[in-house]
Amino acid sequence: MPDNPPIAPEPPPPAKAKKRRRGLWLLELAIFIGIFWVVRALMAPNIPAEFAAHPLPAITAPTVNGGTATIAADGKPTLIVFWATWCGVCHVELPWLNNLAKTEQIFTIALQSGSADEVRAYLAQNQLNHLTVINDPDGQIARQFGVGVTPTLFFLGPDGRIAMAETGITSPWGIRLRLWWLGFF
């Protein structure tokens, strides 16, 4: 009996192969996005129970420019950002926040970044002139909020309750979308 070589299956037509590859690519992308959001959710800070259940008590503190700022419920969505001059991610985010501060209510808290003069010099050097900045040189305010890393963002609804919190880098459109969402509902 002669040895017959095995018959190789016909390769799929190119259109089927492209469709299969596209499907696998979309599946991999969906898995990546899912893992990304799970990790982001796990990294998000715990919102202190008293701040989630009740409006944030008014916080009045001196700003690095010599005035005072009061963080309180005033019927508008508000963003509170803890950042530091030594934080690499903050160097990327602060210009976005500076731009957003022209139209949105944003308060920033410089965490363990030195004296008010040092923070003011950092702001001037980086042309961050639209931010309302409270200095927290010893981390006292950060401890009240349970902040352990920078940047940490707290989104307050119009009622003054902390509705969302996250750490790490985010985008200007992501911030704007969250503030819009809080103001819309």
Image: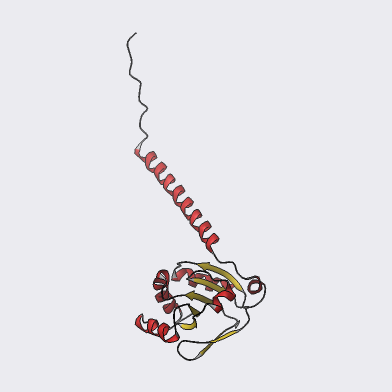
- Tag count in the figure? 0
Q: In screen coordinates, is 37 left or right of 72?
A: left
**Quarter of image, res 172:** bottom left
Residue located 60% across and 69% down the image: 47
Q: Toward the viewer: 2 or 70?
A: 70
x and y percentages locating residue 152 in the rendered image: 51, 71
Q: Quadrant of residue 73?
A: bottom right
Q: Quadrant of the C terminus?
A: bottom right
As drawn, 40 above or below 10: below
x then y, percent, for residue 183: 57, 75
Viewer can see residue 183 = no
Residue at 57% in and 69% down: 164
Task: From the top left corner, tell me how far across and down residue 30 is, in percent.
Answer: 48, 52
Examine the rendered structure and indicate whether residue 37 appears above or below residue 96.
above
Residue at image position (47%, 77%) is 112
Residue 98: where, in percent of width, then height? 42, 79
Q: Residue furthest bottom?
A: 66
- Residue with the most extreme top position: 1
Pick the front one: 169 or 135: 135
